[in-house]
Amino acid sequence: MQTVNGEQRERIVYPNLPLAIYREIAAHLRQVTGIQALELPQDKPQFDYARSQIGGLSISYLSDISEGDRALVDAILKHYADRYGSYERQAI
């Protein structure tokens, strides 16, 4: 995870996840104190119905986030992974 001015940013990608579910995940993440979540545009040049219509989520938070809030973020991401398949976390 990259830290800029004490803020960490990550890209969360669930392959083939629909836009509506990404928005649901972002809404859940935003309920965690100090978490910001934004939808990222699709970066593939060709439209493909078999792929998600969104590029993933960008989440950011201060590096001093509490362990409880960090665990809650992990639990939210795991919940959706259990339902829709694994995800990738990438530093941005």
Image (tube, rainbow, N blue to C red):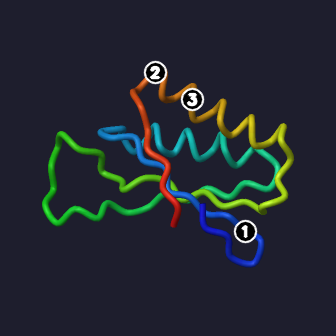
> Is 32 placed left or right of 56 in the picture?
right
Q: Is residue 79 above or below residue 14?
A: above
Asked whether the beta carbons under mark 3 and mark 1 sit within 8 Å of each other, the answer is no
**Residue picked out by circle 2:** 83
Answer with mark 1 or mark 2, whichever residue precedes in sequence: 1
> Is 47 placed left or right of 26 in the picture?
left
**Residue picked out by circle 1:** 7
Q: Secondary structure at mark 3?
A: helix
Residue drawn where x is 36% and y is 56% of the image: 55
Q: Amino acid at mark 1?
A: Glu
Residue 30, percent across and down?
A: 70, 49
**Residue picked out by circle 3:** 78
Residue drawn where x is 72% and y is 68% of the image: 7
Circle 2 residues within 10 Å: few <14, some 14–19, many ≥20: few
Residue drawn where x is 31% and y is 60% of the image: 42
Q: Quadrant of the N terminus?
A: bottom right
Q: Amino acid at mark 2?
A: Arg
Answer with mark 3 or mark 1, whichever residue precedes in sequence: 1
Q: Which is closer to the viewer, label 3 or label 2?
A: 3
Asked whether the beta carbons under mark 1 and mark 2 sit within 8 Å of each other, the answer is no
Residue 54, percent across and down?
A: 36, 53
Answer with mark 3 or mark 2, whichever residue precedes in sequence: 3
Q: Is residue 82 above or below residue 90?
A: above
Q: Amino acid at mark 3?
A: Lys
Disc 1 from disc 2: Cα separation: 29 Å
Residue drawn where x is 68% and y is 76% of the image: 4
Count numbered badges in the picture: 3
> Is 20 placed left or right of 38 in the picture?
left
Mark seen at residue 31? none
Residue 36, percent across and down?
A: 68, 58
